[in-house]
Amino acid sequence: MKHWNGTAKKITAALLLVALAAALTWGVTWYTEQKNGPARLVQTYVQAVNDRDFDAFCRCLLPTYQKDLQKAAEQKGGQALMEENYQSAFGSGRPGAALGEDVRLTVTDLQTEQITPEGENYRGIDLVGLEVSEVANVRCTVTSAGTAGSAAQKVEAVCVRIGRQWYLYTMVGVSDPVTATDAGQ
């Protein structure tokens, strides 16, 4: 009887270890999915824009876009490209210039909707050749705030999953920006 109890204990311990390993694997997978999901991708993208972080910015985009940007960066430099894009949006004489200096973007009201594309097309976006396993629509509000004011705009981002990685395919404003003064504040 003692021999059976020792064997039963070993089997029970082994089964508990297998169950613990399975739970840990599931937990890590779930955490990674939450951390790297489409909504997190949009936040990472906005943070990269705020930080003018060329490498982080590129990692958010499709690999084909990354290659094109890296080629352009070879000529001008990644930081210079990020600053150029920032100035085209918020520099002197641009629509965002009214916000003042040190404009920072924030993302709120993130809502993610998983999409089932019809074939290799989603709302006119050609997904051919991308090996997309999932498509998600992220709706959010992006607020631009500087020393002289702020403006908020509803934005829609289409994110695609290729392999285990999510990438930003498009991100467009779906409403006109509303400045704090326009809103009567």
Image (cartoon, rainbow, N blue to C red):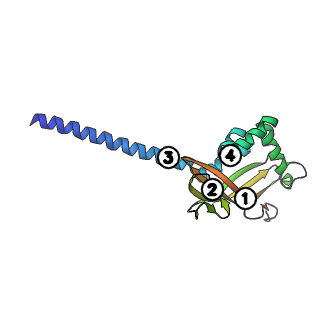
**Image position, residue 78 (x, y; %):** 76, 37
Residue 119 position by quadrant: bottom right
Q: Earlier in the sequence, mark 2 or mark 4?
A: 4
Indicate the amino acid at tag 1: Val
How far apart are the two marked residues, 1 and 4, measured between alpha carbons?
Answer: 19 Å
Q: Is residue 142 left or right of residue 87?
A: left
N-terminal label among 3 and 4: 3
The three-letter code of the residue at mark 2 reads Val
User: What residue is rendered at 81% in x and 64% in y?
Assistant: 182
3 or 4: mark nearer the eye: 4
Q: Which residue is mark 3?
A: 31
Are the residues at dot 3 and dot 4 in contact (C-beta closer than 8 Å)?
no
Which label's residue is closer to the chain start, 1 or 4?
Answer: 4
Which residue corresponds to mark 2? 128
Disc 3 to disc 4, C-alpha distance: 27 Å
Q: Nearer the viewer, mark 1 or mark 3?
A: 1
- Amino acid under disc 3: Tyr
Label 1 – label 2 distance at C-alpha: 21 Å
* Nearest to N terminus: mark 1 or mark 3: 3
Residue 150 placement: quadrant? bottom right
Q: Residue at x 87, y 53 (%)?
A: 94
- Residue 167's spot in the image, x, y percent? 63, 49
